[in-house]
Each structure stands twice: as C-alpha cells, then as structure tokens.
C-alpha cells in the first residue's frame, strides 16, 4: 500500500505528521550517521502512548515498513525507512523523578544527556552510554554499556518496568510480575517486541565523579598496559579508550596532531580522594600529552553535542577475552596503515557489576566477556565506502577470536551476526517470545529476530 495522501493523517492519528512535501521533511528524516539517506513516506511524531498505538495500527493495516526512532544513532540506520513510516519519539520527553524512592519514569524520546542532567540535580544517576545525544530508548533495549557499567551494571540492570505498545496496538505495563517473558526480552533484545514509550529506572546516589580525558602516546606497551590497568582498577572506575590519530583539539599540543594516541575517557564514580588514587596508575603509563582529569558533576563527562555532525562511517564490533602486547601491536600496525580520514580502535574493559548478573537473567547474555573492541573508519565521500569497509572487516577479522557481538554496536551485517548477539538458548527463547507478541514480524526494522514458527515453552 502507498500513502498517496497524508494530509488527513495527522488528525486521524492524533499526532504530528511530516510528509515529503513539508519544508522540514529533510531535517526530520535525518539520522546521526550520514551514511543513511532514506526517504520515508511519512514521519509521525506522537506525544502520547495512545498516539503511538495508532501509528502502529496504521503500519499494521497498510503493510508499510515501520521504523522506530528514539535518538537516531543506530549504526544500521534503523531509525529511518525507505518508503515506509518513521515513528519518531523525540517529542515524548516527560521525566518524573522520585528522589526519595530513587526511581524515575522516563519517556523514550529523552536523550541520555537530558535524563542524566535532570537526575544529577538530585545527586542521582542511571548509567547509559558515553554520548549524551543518544536516545534512551534504543540504548536501553539493547543493553546499555557506559561509564557506570562496572559500578552499577548495564542500563537494563537498572530497568524496573516499561510501557510497551505491542503489534496489536495494546499498551502493556511490563515488569518482573506483569508479562515477565516480555520484560526479560526487552532487556537486551532490542526493538523486536514493541515500541517502548516509557521506562522506569532505578537511580543511584552520585554527587560527582572524578574523570575526564587522558591522552597518552599509543605505543603497544602503553595500550596493553592501559587495558591491564583498567582491569585491575576498582569497580568504581570505567574507561573508554580510543586508539586513534590525535585530532587538532585546542588542549593537544600541535606537534602531536595526527600522531597515534590513546585518547581515553575515564570515570571514577565515587569520592575525590579514592578517585584520584584510582587514576594514578593511568597517569603513570607514559608522560601525558593532555590530562583533563578532575572532580566534576557526572553530566559534564558527556562531550558537547553538535547537531550538524553526521559522519560517514563504517564499523565492526567484537568481544575479546584475551588482550596482550601482540593484540596491541596489531592495533598500532593496522591504524598506521589506514587511509581513512579518521581510523580508530575503541577499547572498553568490562567486568564488575555487569558480570555478576547471571547470563540467563536478561536477553543480553555476554555477561562474562572481558572487553569490547570497536574498529571504525570515518571518511569524507560515499564513493570511498568500499575501500574502508574492506579495511575495517580485515582489521576486525585479525582481532577476532570467537563469535559474539553487542547488539547496540552492530551494523547491517546479516542474520548470522545478529545470532552472535544472542548465543546459546537465548535466540530460541527470544524467537518464541517474538511469536507471542509480534507473530507477523511487524517490528522488523531492527536487528531482527524472526518469530518462531513453532512455539516452545517460554520460561
């Protein structure tokens, strides 16, 4: 079915509708990555769950592809459809914080930065990722690995309840007691099971952190020692290290611009004195090129957003359970041989609170993996994409030791890679739940888990 006349749909759906002839259509269809330039038939921006249900019903009845967007940061471009319907949640931003109960109900159009800033006003926090502009909808449904992952676990470990619009248009309250199978599935299973309109999160006390950026020269010894220091650090400390050519930032001396560095963001979620002690081993790895580590309010750890930044990029992500000097040497060798305008290997040490949750407790089953490595290339022109895709694929293959990927870092890489995100019995359990709540696979613009054709018992 084609939607040839959408002029009446806004009133019918009870929501704002943006069509191709509207002056703000091109802006509204944009997602974070400039790699994706798709033209949906319409973009709906609901402000309430009832409006979401009507848009879902329109997609079901019309047969048009339905893309769901929270922040639009999907590495596979899942926040926009070619010729289908985009359900854009960005106007749903209500946030109700209960400081005494340390919980919050948050609509899924909020960004991580908006939520974090509001919670910080009460000395509280919930962990998301490492970018403030990411929507809380997608990062939560996929798992959520960020600066509090070793101290408090993943985002889904602080998810207490959710409201979900299912494929049949129902609005369900989902928690450990109500629809427990669906509650299990949405904690890591992505957007396969419905549209999340609100989440209830647990909040933790966090008055301030000790953190910031530390830039070190990227020798194999420094890289390997950084990973070892991150593993040995107290659980209050989480780190994201980008091995990359130094950009021309104002606080980076000019002689280091373009030289390979470890550009690390470190966050100690605790008091100043033990935080400074925990950061000392990192500062001792080499003479720092730049050091902005200091006590700060937690929201300041997020870099400023640039609404006009829309990179062309290709990336691959993998888990590693062993990292030594040989792996560090490989990273240096491959990055020095890159031809992209920016090439990077990002290292995230896991463990801590995340690893203490049983693998079967949520749909994210990679609880015991040691670290995540992301390999990426950014480039200025779309015609360069095949060259950099080949470089990224070869780099990731050289590092890769076995199967496994974190679904929120997964691009458009085929069904086999999606299955790697859900190992063992997790895939079959998710497929059975999918068959119960979305038997026709209406929610398929995602890292898709098709509904099981037969329905095994669901725990």
Image (cartoon, grey):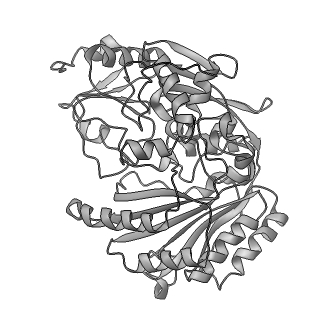
In the rendered image, residue 129, in percent from the top left (x then y), is placed at 58, 49
Q: Give how far across and how far down residue 120 sits, in percent.
A: 69, 44
On the rendered structure, is 209 left or right of 443? Answer: right
Q: Is residue 228 above or below residue 435?
A: below
State left or right for residue 65 relative to residue 396. left
| Nearer to me, 303 or 74 | 74
Residue lying farthest right?
A: 273
User: Relative to residue 271, is residue 23 depicted above or below?
Assistant: above
Q: Which residue appears at 24% of the width and 14% of the height?
A: 8
Which quarter of the image is occupied by the C terminus?
top right
Is there any visible trace of residue 58 in the rendered image?
Answer: yes
Q: Report whether residue 48 is seen.
A: no
Outermost residue on the left side: it is 4
Q: Quadrant of residue 107?
A: top right
Q: Position of residue 372 (x, y in %)?
A: 56, 58
Tell me what residue is drawn at x 70 percent, y 46 percent. 153
Q: Nearer the viewer, residue 288 or 251?
A: 288
Left or right of 304 in this view: 386:
left
**Quadrant assignment for the N terminus:** top left
At 68% across and 53% down in the image, what residue appears? 298
Total marks shown come to 0
Position above or below: 349 against 134? below
């Amino acid at each position: 079915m084609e939607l040839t006349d959408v002029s009446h749909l806004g009133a019918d759906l009870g929501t704002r509708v943006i069509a191709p002839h509207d002056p703000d259509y091109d802006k509204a269809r944009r997602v974070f990555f400039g790699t994706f330039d798709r033209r949906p038939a319409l973009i709906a921006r609901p402000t309430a769950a009832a409006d979401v249900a009507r848009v879902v019903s329109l997609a079901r009845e019309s047969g048009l592809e339905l893309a769901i967007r929270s922040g639009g940061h999907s590495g596979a471009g899942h926040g926009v459809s070619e010729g289908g319907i985009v359900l854009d949640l960005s106007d749903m931003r209500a946030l109700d914080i209960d400081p005494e109960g340390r919980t919050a109900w948050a609509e899924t159009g909020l960004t991580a930065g908006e939520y974090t800033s509001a919670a910080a006003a009460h000395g509280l926090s919930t962990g998301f990722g490492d970018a403030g502009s990411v929507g809380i909808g997608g990062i939560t449904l996929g798992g959520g690995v960020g600066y509090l992952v070793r101290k408090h676990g993943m985002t889904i470990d602080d998810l207490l309840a959710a409201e979900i619009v299912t494929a049949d248009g129902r609005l369900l309250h989902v928690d450990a007691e109500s629809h427990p199978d669906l509650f299990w599935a949405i904690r890591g299973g992505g957007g396969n099971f419905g549209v999340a309109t609100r989440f209830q999160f647990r909040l933790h006390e966090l008055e301030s952190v000790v953190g910031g950026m530390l830039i070190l020269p990227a020798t194999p010894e420094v890289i390997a020692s950084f990973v070892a220091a991150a593993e040995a650090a107290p659980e209050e400390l989480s780190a994201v290290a980008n091995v990359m050519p130094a950009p021309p930032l104002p606080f980076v001396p000019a002689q280091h611009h373009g030289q390979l560095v470890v550009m690390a963001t470190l966050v100690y979620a605790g008091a100043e004195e033990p935080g400074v002690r925990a950061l000392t081993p990192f500062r001792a790895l080499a003479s720092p090129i730049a050091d902005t580590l200091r006590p700060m309010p937690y929201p300041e750890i997020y870099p400023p957003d640039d609404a006009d930044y829309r990179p062309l990029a290709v990336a691959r992500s993998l888990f590693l359970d062993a990292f030594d000097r040989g792996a560090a040497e490989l990273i240096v060798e491959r990055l020095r041989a890159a031809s992209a305008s920016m090439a990077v290997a990002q290292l995230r040490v896991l463990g801590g609170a995340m690893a203490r949750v049983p693998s079967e407790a949520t749909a994210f089953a990679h609880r015991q993996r040691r670290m995540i490595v992301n390999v990426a290339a950014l480039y200025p022109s779309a015609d360069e994409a095949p060259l950099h895709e080949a470089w990224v694929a070869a780099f990731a293959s050289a590092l890769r030791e076995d199967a496994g990927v974190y679904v929120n870092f997964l691009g458009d890489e085929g069904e086999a890679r999606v299955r790697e995100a859900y190992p063992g019995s997790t895939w079959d359990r998710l497929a059975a739940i999918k068959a119960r709540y979305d038997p026709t696979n209406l929610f398929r613009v995602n890292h898709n888990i098709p509904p099981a054709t037969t329905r095994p018992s669901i725990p």
